[in-house]
Image (cartoon, rainbow, N blue to C red):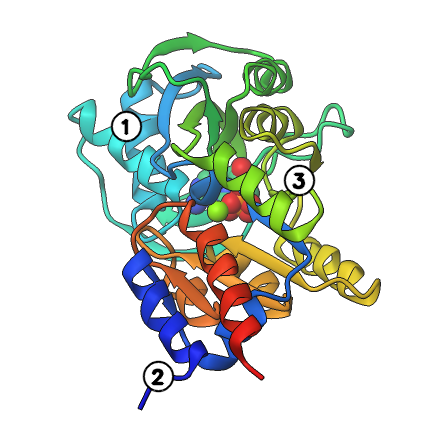
Amino acid sequence: ATMPPLLSAIANAGRHGVLVKSAVVMERLGQVDRVAFDKTGTLTEGAPRVAEVRLTGALAEPDVLALAAAAELPSEHPLARAVVAAARERGVEVPRATEFSSAPGRGVRAVVGGREVTVGRPAAPSRPGRAPEPAGRDSEPTGRAPEPSVGEVREVRDLETSVRELEAAGRTAVVVTVDGSPVAVLGVSDRLRDGAAAAVTALARLSGTGPTLLTGDNDRAAHRVAADAGITDVRARLLPEDKVAAVREWERAGRRTLVVGDGVNDAPALAAAHTGIAMGRAGSDLALETADAVVVRDELATVPAVVALSRRARALVV
Ligand code: ADP
Ligand code: MG
């Protein structure tokens, strides 16, 4: 017997490095006419580096890195891995944290040696005078030049200025607080994945609309990555529920949305989308379980490839 077209397409997708979870998914992939990408870990490599450390002066750099890394150790977020790597590269011993908690799209909180430590995204800039409340976001792609892991160390008095300067440089600013007071801003950078721009072009052609970038990161970092990837529609500073709201809005307008993401913060949007694809290599377990298909080979070119495979298979299904 000849294999039914959708089953052949699944086998074919597997050869391209994409695990498509069912024939129904294989069929739906070809129907998408709207595409949205997450930024960190999806359009970018998801291997961010702490390029800059700015201290408020309350604690020395090794202490800041030790506390921040302790709080980030249990997190699987790419930014968390960058913070832990920065501490290790400095030869800083990472203490044990207790009472760990994480807020997807915001950051982490833990108790380290009796002190409450938070690491995460700066508070909205529109509220001057307030100490940033850390919550995590992602790291940022910048150019292609390799970044030193922990670069410049500077003392800052004005946290908000530092956040603004780092973000203007296309970095993701991550704020560290200890017992409620900010002690440092870390400037984190990430690189665009090879093939991101080509995948964006191919998906724009297949879906008839340019893809949208949905990210929890800051506007400048988001626009930097979007420009490099050839994306003009950018929505930044989104919480996980905002990503879902964007998807629902398109679906209500009759669009069939493909969401490509990797993080715990993307899982709700992957579930809400007509079709969700997770980046498999560094993707969170929740994203992999929630998505309809998983990119195992870790190349973005596989995404337009499976959409095209679905179109061809559907043309053969009577
Ligand atoms: P993206 O949508 O680009 O993948 P996320 O929604 O995962 O980004 O994160 C949004 C923002 O929340 C990050 O830019 C960072 O400021 C903050 N953040 C999230 N998780 C962490 C973490 N574990 N450590 C530090 N900051 C974090
Ligand atoms: Mg991500």
Q: Earlier in the sequence, mark 1 or mark 3?
A: 1
**Label 3, residues with CA under 10 Å away: few <14, some 14-19, many ≥20:** some
Q: Which kind of residue does numbered mark 1 sit on? A: Ala
Q: Which mark, by number, is residue 3?
A: 2
Q: Which kind of residue does numbered mark 2 sit on? A: Met
Q: Which kind of residue does numbered mark 3 sit on? A: Arg
Q: For the residue with label 2, is its CB less than 8 Å from the closest atom of ligand 2? A: no
Residue 72 x %, y %: 35, 44
Residue 39 x %, y %: 53, 40
Real-space Cα separation, disc 1 to disc 2, in angstroms = 51 Å
Quadrant position of residue 20:
bottom left
Quadrant position of residue 123:
top right
Q: Is residue 290 left or right of residue 76?
A: right
Helix, strand or loop under label 2: loop
Residue pictured at 59% horizontal, 19% vertical: 159
**Label 1, residues with CA under 10 Å away: few <14, some 14-19, many ≥20:** many
Residue pictured at 44% horizontal, 14% vertical: 57
Q: Which mark, by number, is residue 34?
A: none
Q: Is residue 81 left or right of residue 192?
A: left
Front residue (pair 197, 180):
197
Front residue (pair 148, 318):
318
Residue ID for mark 1: 86
Residue 279 x %, y %: 40, 54
Q: Which mark, by number, is residue 237?
A: 3
Given this view, does label 3 or label 2 mark the residue nearer the observer? Answer: 2
Q: Earlier in the sequence, mark 1 or mark 2?
A: 2
Given this view, does label 1 or label 2 mark the residue nearer the observer? Answer: 2
